[in-house]
Image (spheres, helix red, strand yellow):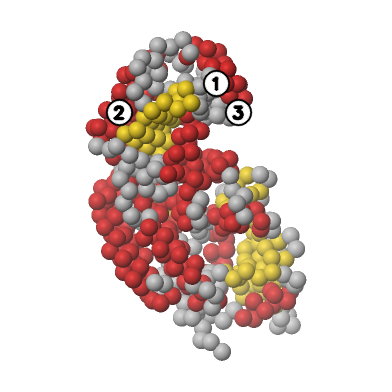
């Protein structure tokens, strides 16, 4: 019989055997922190009696408190999934009895989180494996996560200052090294050097993010396995309940887990779409714009992959299963830190020429993972006006003065992204020679390579395209196209393509 791992501090075999018998037929899922039984229309989660540096379920009282916290936190995101906490009690005959959600449990020997069961084929990791994730789903997920993040209160005093980041990175390094041969020691050594090096130049940015309110009580564990499709909508669940230190984080670090998971599976196009959809919708922080926080994204992605590597290696210590996935995460962690100099690409053309389609197609292939930020004039216009991307601007909004202001904000956003070391694809009409010249001048000012693409399109094709749009940030109509085709565009020196 193999020895119990050191982080398992209490024998729960009686409770686990009881649940397996009481809930039969049931399917059992084991993780490093829980045993889950899927039975009928419900899922029952027993927290393992484990104690890690980052997670303490070592006593029944602690597990009871964490079960209650899990319900409270996750009902913010998935109220239709979380039913309540149920006790496992000792009956009069000495045997165990399973209570119902909400029952008191003064005599409980352990506790369960009870959830409404859902179709596991709707888990986004499974959908990714069978190629079922789509850009439209990333649009919905980006919007949902941005709303969630935007509605959270700021936390300016906990766990996310420069020294906290240093300590956290050091802990990541230490945990990988302690995993020993369960992970790849040479890769652990390389990350021990690369991760602190990726942090040190940006400690002032870390401080600005904290003071500006970017640190909030987030989901904390937002990988694909913790998002499920319910009623056609992506629903995050299983948020971190056991550690404020892990969950009180920068909102971009929260999103980074999903971005990492998609990128690691070769789904950079979807990761890029998710990043852009989130950036287009997340509430702005004037004192520390999310654009400049992209300087921290390589470290955020690397940390997410490193933590996943360590957690998966701990799970294999319990289950004895293959360690290859943990090492794959570790290799990904190092890859996220590889440099990729930024560049600026501008896509211009009259409305309906396919600018946004081309911009989103090219963005994942440009710069560091998960690709370039698409800065759209249509999005900037609505953000400036406080209008939802899917809603139309009020009549009279498209004045020359308003357009000039939008272009200025549009270029300023692109410059912030470039100075954060991230590539940019500009998406705008660029009808005026001065606007095209300004894009080229921006590249020269920041010191990055520039490429301009102009899309030509027949008027009828453009009008048909804009007439068919639904829920797009652009408000262009066939009448707008008619006017645009009367513009004096001047000499166009960019690469011309037929749309």
Q: Is residue 497 above or below residue 418?
A: above
Q: Residue at x 31, y 69 (%)?
A: 189
Q: Which residue is mark 1?
A: 462
In the image, 50 versus 335, the foreground residue is 335
The crowd level at tag 2 (other Cα within 10 Å; few <14, some 14-19, many 20+) is some
Residue 116 in which image quadrant: bottom right
Q: Earlier in the sequence, mark 1 or mark 3?
A: 1
Q: Residue at x 59, y 48 (%)?
A: 133
In the image, 194 versus 257, the foreground residue is 194
The crowd level at tag 3 (other Cα within 10 Å; few <14, some 14-19, many 20+) is few
Residue 38 horizontal/vertical position (percent) = 69, 65
Residue 118 in which image quadrant: bottom right
Q: Horizontal placement of 479 versus 300: left or right?
A: right
Q: Residue at x 69, y 58 (%)?
A: 117
Residue 75 horizontal/vertical position (percent) = 59, 51
Label 1 SS:
helix
Q: Considering the image in quadrants, where does the N terminus appear? A: bottom right
Q: Could you tell me how many numbered marks the image carries?
A: 3
Q: Is residue 234 above or below residue 445?
A: below
Q: Which residue is mark 3?
A: 470
Q: Which residue is mark 2?
A: 440
Q: Is residue 262 above or below residue 392?
A: below
Asked whether the residues under the numbered discs 1 and 3 touch, taking CB atoms below 8 Å apart as contact, a structural biologist would say no
């Amino acid at each position: 019989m193999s020895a119990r791992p050191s982080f398992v501090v209490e024998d729960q075999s009686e409770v686990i055997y009881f649940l397996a018998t009481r809930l039969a037929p049931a399917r059992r899922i084991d993780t490093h922190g829980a045993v889950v039984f899927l039975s009928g229309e419900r899922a029952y989660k027993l927290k393992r009696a484990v104690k890690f540096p980052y997670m303490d379920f070592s006593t029944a009282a602690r597990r009871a408190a964490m079960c209650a916290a899990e319900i409270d936190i996750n009902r913010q995101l998935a109220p239709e999934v979380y039913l309540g906490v149920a006790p496992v009690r000792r009956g009069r005959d000495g045997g165990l009895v399973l209570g119902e959600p909400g029952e008191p449990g003064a005599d409980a020997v352990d506790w369960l989180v009870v959830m409404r069961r859902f179709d596991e084929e709707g888990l986004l990791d499974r959908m990714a494996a069978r190629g079922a994730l789509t850009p439209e789903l990333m649009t919905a997920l980006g919007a949902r996560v941005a709303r969630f993040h935007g509605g959270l209160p700021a936390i300016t005093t906990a766990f996310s200052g420069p020294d906290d980041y240093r300590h956290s990175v050091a802990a990541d390094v230490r945990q990988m090294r302690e995993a020993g041969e369960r992970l790849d020691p040479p890769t652990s050594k390389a990350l021990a050097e690369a991760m602190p090096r990726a942090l040190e130049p940006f400690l002032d940015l870390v401080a600005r993010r904290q003071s500006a309110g970017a640190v909030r009580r987030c989901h904390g564990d937002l990988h694909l396995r913790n998002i499920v499709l319910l009623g056609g909508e992506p629903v995050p669940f299983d948020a971190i309940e056991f550690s404020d230190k892990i969950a009180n984080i920068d909102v971009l670090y929260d999103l980074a887990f999903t971005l990492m998971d998609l990128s690691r599976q070769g789904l950079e196009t979807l990761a890029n779409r998710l990043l852009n959809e989130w950036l287009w919708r997340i509430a702005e922080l004037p004192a520390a714009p999310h654009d400049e926080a992209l300087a921290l994204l390589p470290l955020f992605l690397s940390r997410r992959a490193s933590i996943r590597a360590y957690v998966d290696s701990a799970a294999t210590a319990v289950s004895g299963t293959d360690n290859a996935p943990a090492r794959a995460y570790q290799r990904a962690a190092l890859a996220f830190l590889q440099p990729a100099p930024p560049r600026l690409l501008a896509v211009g053309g009259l409305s309906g020429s396919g600018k946004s389609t081309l911009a989103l197609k090219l963005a994942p292939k440009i710069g560091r993972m998960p690709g370039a930020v698409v800065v759209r004039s249509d999005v900037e216009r609505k953000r400036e006006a406080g209008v939802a991307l899917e809603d139309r601007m009020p009549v009279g909004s498209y004045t020359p003065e308003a357009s000039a202001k939008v272009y200025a904000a549009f270029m300023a956003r692109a410059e912030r992204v470039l100075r954060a070391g991230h590539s940019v694809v500009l998406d705008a009409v660029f009808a005026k020679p001065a606007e095209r010249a300004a894009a080229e001048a921006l590249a020269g000012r920041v010191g990055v390579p520039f490429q301009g693409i102009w899309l030509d399109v027949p008027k009828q094709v453009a009008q048909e395209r804009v007439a068919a749009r639904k829920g797009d940030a652009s408000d262009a109509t066939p009448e707008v196209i008619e006017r645009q085709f009367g513009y004096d565009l001047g000499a166009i020196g960019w690469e011309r393509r037929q749309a």
